[in-house]
Image: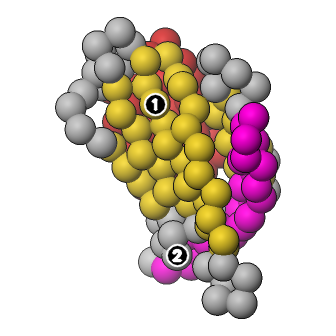
Amino acid sequence: MIEFEIKDVESSAYLRFEGKITQGQVAYDGCSFALKLHSTNVSATTHAYDCQFNKWTRFFEELASNSGGWNGVTDCESLEGDLRLEATSDSLGHIRLRIRLRNVDPRTMWSAETSITLEAGQLDTLAKQAKAYFGC
């Protein structure tokens, strides 16, 4: 799979992961993947570097396993902070996914942030898609 997309249920907003994740990496072998964030007020693209892709799969699997809701924030961040996801839930089965993309190059630093809404019924599918994309 060379693409994984998370779509907002209330608007046309989305976060798209693009590019092939190199499979079979060990220890701290890593690779970069492209990110595209789009919403009514924000449009940004960047690349994120990571070497422990199983944490992204675990993040989405954890959301799915707690689809009835949870207290507090569940989060995940790329190795260099290019991508950060923070998920919260309410008692009605809505999940708010706060997304932060940033460019950490000191010459051109920027960040973009928005939130998208998911429904509990999407979480199993997202977890499966994340596993297929990240390969672990």
**Image side of residue 118 versus residue 68, left or right:** right
The residue under label 2 is 80
* Magenta-highlighted residues: 28-51
**Image side of residue 18 versus residue 119, left or right:** right
Helix or strand or loop: what does disc 1 sit on?
strand
**Residue at the far front in the pictured view:** 41
Q: Residue 96 carries which label?
A: 1
Q: Where is residue 69 in the image (x, y as percent from the top left)?
A: 28, 21
| Kind of residue sitting beneath label 2 | Glu
| Front residue of this view, candidates 51 and 103 | 103
**Image side of residue 5 versus residue 104, left or right:** right
Helix or strand or loop: what does disc 2 sit on?
loop
C-alpha separation, residue under disc 2 versus residue under disc 1: 23 Å
Q: Where is residue 30 in the image (x, y as percent from the top left)?
A: 59, 75
Instruction: Specify few, some or many for label 1: CA neighbours under 10 Å numbering under 14, 14-19, or 20 or more.
Output: some
Q: Position of residue 24 (x, y in %)?
A: 59, 65
